[in-house]
Structure formats: C-alpha cells, structure tokens
C-alpha cells in the first residue's frame, strides 16, 4: 500500500470517530443549557423580591449568557473543517534573533489559549534557533497539533503576519526592534479526494530529531521530512518514535497545506474577478503587538485593540477571535 493510500484509510476512520464524538458533545451541551435555563427560571419565580437570592441569580444568569453567546458564535462556523482540529505552524521572519524569540512567544501564546479552551496540544515539529532568549530557546519554525471542538474554526483567521515592536533583549544599547513571524493555520484532517498527492510527486527524507541549540536528542533517524516537488512545500514531523507514524502524520500535514494553498488560490481568483486588490501576505501584517514606547495589541483587519498586552501574550485571544468571526 502506498503512503497516500495508507494515510487515506487511517484518516477516514479517525474522522468518523471524531465526528461522532462531536455530535455527542453537542447534544449533551444543549441538554445541559436547556436544563440550566429551566432551573434559573424556576429559581427566579420562587425568589420573587428576595434580594438575598439576587447575587446567586445574577451569577447563574451571566454564566448561562456566556454559554449561549459561545454557542451563537459557533453557529458561524460554516466551513467544512471548522468544527475539527487544527494544525498551527509558526515561522520566524525578518528580525534575526528577535524574530526567533518572537516566534517562541507566539507558540507559547497559542498553547496557553488552547489550554484555556480545554484543547489538547502536541508539538509535531520544532526547529530551534541558535540562542536562548527571554522566552527560552528561540525557534525558526514549529508546528502544533491542537485537538478540540471547533479548534480550526476559532483559529483559522489567525493566519497571517504578526508584528512585534519592543526594546530588543539582544541589543546591548537597548534599542527598539521590530520583528515578524508568519502564522499558518490548517485543518488537521483534509479528505484525500480534495487534494491530489501522487506518489511520484513527493520525496521522503529521514533525519534525527534535534533539541535546542542544535543538540542531538535522537540517535535514530525517526524524524520525517516530506517535500512536494510540484509546489516545493515541505513538512516535517518528529514527535513520534517510529518512522511509520511520523510519515503518516507528515502526509496528513502535507495534505492540509496543499488544501490551504488551493483555498488561497481560489480566493485570489475570486478577488481578481471582482476587481479587488489583495495585499501580499508577507508584506501586510494582520496584527501588531507593541510593547514599547506604549502597550497595545491591535488587529488591523477588525480594528479591535487592547492595552492588556501581557494578558494577550498569555493566551487571552478571545476578543480578537470573536471580532474576526463577526466580520
């Protein structure tokens, strides 16, 4: 069996299992919300004008309101893969050591967001930089698997260039520095019939997994890198102990990147027909994070902004995500 065929069978089985789990959770959620609403209505009727019960009523009301708002926001997830898992990749851009440190900061930010959402996170691949900074070892690029209900729907609009302005921790003269990193979000599963991956179009290389600063952490060549020759797209996975498992994950990651490329080409063609001008991805950042001379995080697409930079970098992204969903 060829690698694409092997991936196809395994991926289909996993997709069906996860779709069933999502439906069961949705039913359970609606039953819980309905029950909580009835309980709150009954409690309000019994309380009457009793001010002593008011704090508890308000607490339960706001909790239920928040849950309903979340459900309403998720109704906007109309894309085919919106309700599934996501693969988020980060690439350091212009800015040298600062950019590698910035990429590590973004990786932590999305990990913290996922943890708060109750998602499971796994690092599929991480190419470390050469120096350790305030955020630990910088990274040249990394790929995270984020598993949770609606993970792709929530994160897909995070794709784009993220810009950081701060006093560089690597500058002996404490100069202000601007760094860039590219975030790419893909669905974790893409149906094989949506992308055409021919065995002759891919090159598979095996290498040893490495740690920070080039440190070798694996004596066997279990890590896998797959190159798609027609597009020159490369993916790498090193999280598993076996070549076979890493190759399976790499094929799924490649399919997701090819699917995203197809979607982007379709969007560009549609914009061309409408007469719109779309900015180049790398030349137009979607969000700026300013730590100096003032503190501000601003999304350039929606205009949403906050001065609570530390909270954002600690994973408080819901305001930005909800603003983008409403666009």
Image (cartoon, rainbow, N blue to C red):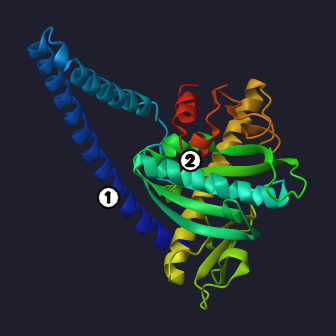
Q: Quick check: 130 left or right of 28?
A: right
The residue at which mark 1 appears reads as: 17
Mark 2: secondary structure: loop
What is the x, y in percent for residue 162?
A: 72, 44
State the residue at coordinates (49%, 39%): 79
What is the x, y in percent for residue 226?
A: 66, 72
What is the x, y in percent for residue 208?
A: 64, 84
Tell which of 9 and 25 is nearer to you: 25
User: Most extreme residue toward the left, as rendered?
Assistant: 46
Q: Quick check: 172 left or right of 135?
A: right
State the residue at coordinates (81%, 61%): 97
Mark 1: secondary structure: helix
Q: Quick check: 293 left or right of 62?
A: right
User: From the viewer's perspective, is residue 220 above or below residue 310?
Assistant: below
The residue at which mark 2 appears reads as: 314
State the residue at coordinates (61%, 91%): 219
User: From the viewer's perspective, is residue 2 above or below residue 271?
Assistant: below
Which quadrant of the view contains residue 221? Answer: bottom right
Tell which of 103 and 32 is nearer to you: 103
Is residue 84 among what the camera can see?
Answer: no
**Between marks 2 and 1 in the image, the one whose residue lies nearer the viewer:** 2
The residues bearing labels 2 and 1 have C-alpha atoms spaced at a distance of 32 Å
User: Most extreme residue toward the right, as rendered?
Assistant: 173
């Amino acid at each position: 069996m060829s690698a694409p065929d092997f991936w196809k069978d395994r991926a289909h089985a996993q997709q069906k299992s996860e779709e069933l789990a999502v439906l069961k959770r949705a039913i359970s959620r609606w039953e819980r919300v309905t029950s909580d609403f009835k309980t709150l209505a009954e409690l309000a009727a019994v309380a009457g004008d009793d001010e002593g019960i008011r704090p508890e009523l308000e607490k339960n009301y706001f909790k239920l309101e928040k849950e309903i708002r979340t459900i309403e926001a998720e109704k906007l997830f109309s894309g085919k893969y919106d309700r599934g898992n996501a693969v988020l990749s980060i690439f350091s851009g212009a800015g040298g050591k600062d950019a590698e440190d910035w990429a590590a900061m973004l990786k932590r930010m999305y990990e913290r967001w996922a943890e708060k959402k109750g998602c499971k996170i796994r690092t599929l691949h991480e190419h470390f930089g050469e120096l350790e900074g305030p955020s630990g070892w910088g990274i040249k690029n990394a790929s995270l698997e984020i598993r949770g209900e609606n993970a792709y729907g929530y994160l897909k609009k995070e794709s784009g260039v993220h810009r950081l302005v701060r006093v560089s921790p690597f500058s002996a003269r404490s100069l202000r520095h601007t760094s860039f990193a590219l975030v790419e979000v893909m669905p974790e599963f893409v149906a094989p019939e949506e992308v055409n991956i021919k065995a002759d179009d891919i090159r598979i290389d095996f290498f040893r997994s490495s740690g920070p600063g080039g440190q070798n952490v694996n004596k066997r060549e279990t890590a896998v890198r797959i190159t798609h020759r027609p597009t020159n797209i490369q993916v790498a996975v090193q999280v598993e102990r076996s070549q076979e498992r890493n190759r399976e994950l790499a094929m799924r990651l490649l399919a997701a990147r090819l699917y995203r490329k197809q979607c982007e080409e379709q969007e560009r063609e549609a914009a061309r027909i409408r007469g719109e001008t779309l900015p180049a991805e790398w030349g137009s950042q979607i969000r700026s994070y300013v730590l100096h001379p003032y503190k501000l995080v601003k999304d350039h697409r929606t205009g949403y902004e906050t001065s609570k930079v530390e909270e954002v970098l600690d994973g408080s992204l819901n305001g930005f995500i909800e603003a983008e969903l409403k666009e």
